[in-house]
Image (tube, helix red, strand yellow):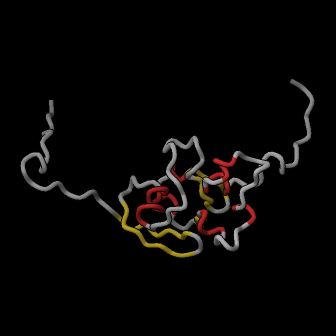
Amino acid sequence: MLHQSTTSAAADGGVAAPPPTGTVRLTINGQQHTLQLAPWTTLLDALREYAHLTGTKKGCDHGQCGACTVLVNGKRINSCLSLAVMHEDHDITTIEGLGSEENLHPSSKPSSTTMPSSAATAPGPNLLGPGPAQRRPRPHRGGN
């Protein structure tokens, strides 16, 4: 039976080695970013901690609340559930990429008729597109 030592350099009084990193090139809001990231870094952490784009929020960190929603190649994703290295050569759009405070993109403007005021202030839901009142209903198909 093989036994591995459970002691580390830090436990022996030494300094622990830094985590391995690699170069990841992300296109965020039309700008190229070259970041040094550990392979397990989520897209959310890459955006907030390394690219310093803090408009995308960390909410539940389980993909349930939508606060971390970004657009990747025009599709909505939860950035807390996706690794940054998976998005090289993709077009990533955050809430910052949808306009400025003076010139908001239409999907960034909160609508009091489609969501509660607390949800309207979070950036993720504003990337979701039209609210239920603005969507066209699907035709009902008969059957069970």
Furthest residue toward left:
13
Furthest residue toward top:
144
Q: Is residue 105 left or right of residue 34?
A: right
The C terminus, quarter of image = top right
Q: Is residue 103 left or right of residue 142?
A: left
Tell me where residue 92 appears, x and y as whole percent.
Answer: 58, 64
The N terminus, quarter of image = top left
142 and 103: which is toward the camera: 103
> What residue is at 43 percent from the left and 72 percent from the top?
34
Placement of 119 over or under 36, stated as above or below: above
Q: Is residue 37 left or right of residue 73?
A: left
> What residue is at 54 percent from the left and 68 percent from the top?
89
19 and 125: which is toward the camera: 125
How many labels sit on residues? 0
Tell me where residue 24 appears, x and y as whole percent.
Answer: 43, 67
Tell me where residue 7 appears, x and y as whole percent.
Answer: 12, 42
> What residue is at 44 percent from the left and 57 percent from the top?
45
Among the 4 quarters of the image, the one containing residue 138: top right
> What residue is at 45 percent from the left and 68 percent from the top?
51
58 and 120: which is toward the camera: 120
Tell me where residue 5 appears, x and y as whole percent.
Answer: 12, 39
Furthest residue toward bottom:
31
